[in-house]
Image (spheres, helix red, strand yellow):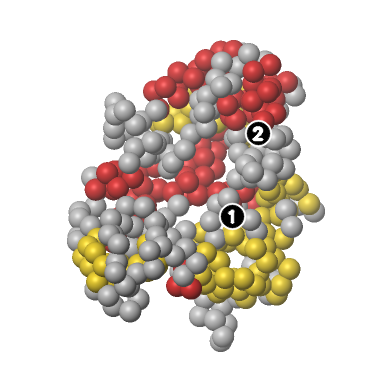
Amino acid sequence: MKVIVGLSGGVDSAVSAWLLKQQGHEVLGIFMKNWEDDDNSEYCSSREDLVDAVSVADHIGIDIEVVNFASEYKDRVFSYFLAEYQAGRTPNPDVLCNTEIKFAAFLDHAMRLGADKIATGHYAGVRETDGRFELLKGDDDSKDQSYFLHRLTQTQLSKAMFPLSEIPKRDVRVIAEREGIPNFAKKDSTGICFIGERPFREFLERYLPKTPGEMLTPEGEHVGKHQGLAYYTLGQRGGLHIGGSRAGSGEPWYVAGKDMAKNELIVVQGREHPALRRKDVPLVNTHWIAGVAPETGNGYGGKTRYRQPDADCRYAPADTAHALPTLHFNEGQWAPTPGQYAVLYRGNVCLGGGVIA
């Protein structure tokens, strides 16, 4: 079988390619170049990543191509990213990057090259049951990435392979070192793919102007100034620069809300302030992997952010009682953030999800 693997320069995709080669597949690597605005900056690692990807391909004994998706990325991912921040929401571009680039632009390119399947280094699984494809959690709970893949379609999953689905991360590094794969010790990338390691607000300020305004408590007490609502997200603790308040409890301050019309940032003291917890999480722009919404009722697990344990919840569709499809959690969830994704599971099967309203 001809499998085209996305080689990012990281150890996960490297071991994925090695495993596929060992299994006897015809393997081709592709390095995706998705960002061009500041290739030469200290924060952009794409050149180093390309060198690593080429070294990996050479060591494994496969060909590699470099494909530029920067135009598609700007149109389909980055424009949405900026528009959401400008609207006061907090998007997750990594989810969109998977849907629009890795499993769309890259998949289309791979099919033109005659691929039977594409593969990535994600910690997730895919299973075919009665002609339908299911997205599964990766066996390594600490690395499961199904959250980022929850918007894939039946067609996309039918062409996907995840060689690391059953392998713990620690074993991936062991395999890489044992086989002499040159990037076995490379640290995992962090941050949003196109931002890299640069300070986040500094990056946003290049694209979105400052619009200073007041920071208020829910009771209306003025406690400081903000630099622009786009630069803050619900649950944020750092970067608020609020001094000690005489009337305050002495606990840290957190962002609890935004009033876009008044350009006001609502802040509270204490991580367990009730304003930071919600049991009911309404969704917009829902996507269900099976092509149909799940059945109404209990028995589901949900998460409103990556790395959060699944929390027991009930799914309710939009009806006379709910203007929007809603996840009703048994326990209040901490800082569900508009623009981020809430993802629904039944056991280890990822059903899909939606954007938090």
- Determine the residue located farthest toward the right in the rendered image: 130
In percent of width and height, residue 316 lies at 62, 76
Q: Which mark is residue 308?
A: 1
Q: Position of residue 90 (x, y in %)?
A: 40, 57
Identified at 50% across, 49% down, the residue is 95
Q: Is residue 19 visible?
A: yes
Q: Amino acid at mark 2?
A: Lys
Circles 1 and 2 in contact, beta carbons < 8 Å: no
Residue at (78%, 52%) from the top-left corner? 129
Give x and y (percent) for residue 146. 62, 48
Horizontal and vertical percent position of residue 116: 65, 33
Q: Secondary structure at mark 2?
A: helix
Q: Badge 2 is on which residue?
A: 169
Above or below — where is 297 with respect to 131? below
At label 1, which amino acid type do we have?
Gln
Secondary element type, mark 1: loop
Please report the residue visible at 60 percent of the width from the left and 17 percent of the height from the top: 181
Q: What residue is shown at x 64% (from left), y 52% (from top)?
A: 154
On the rendered structure, is 260 left or right of 347?
A: left
Q: Tell me where residue 330 sits by quadrant.
A: bottom right
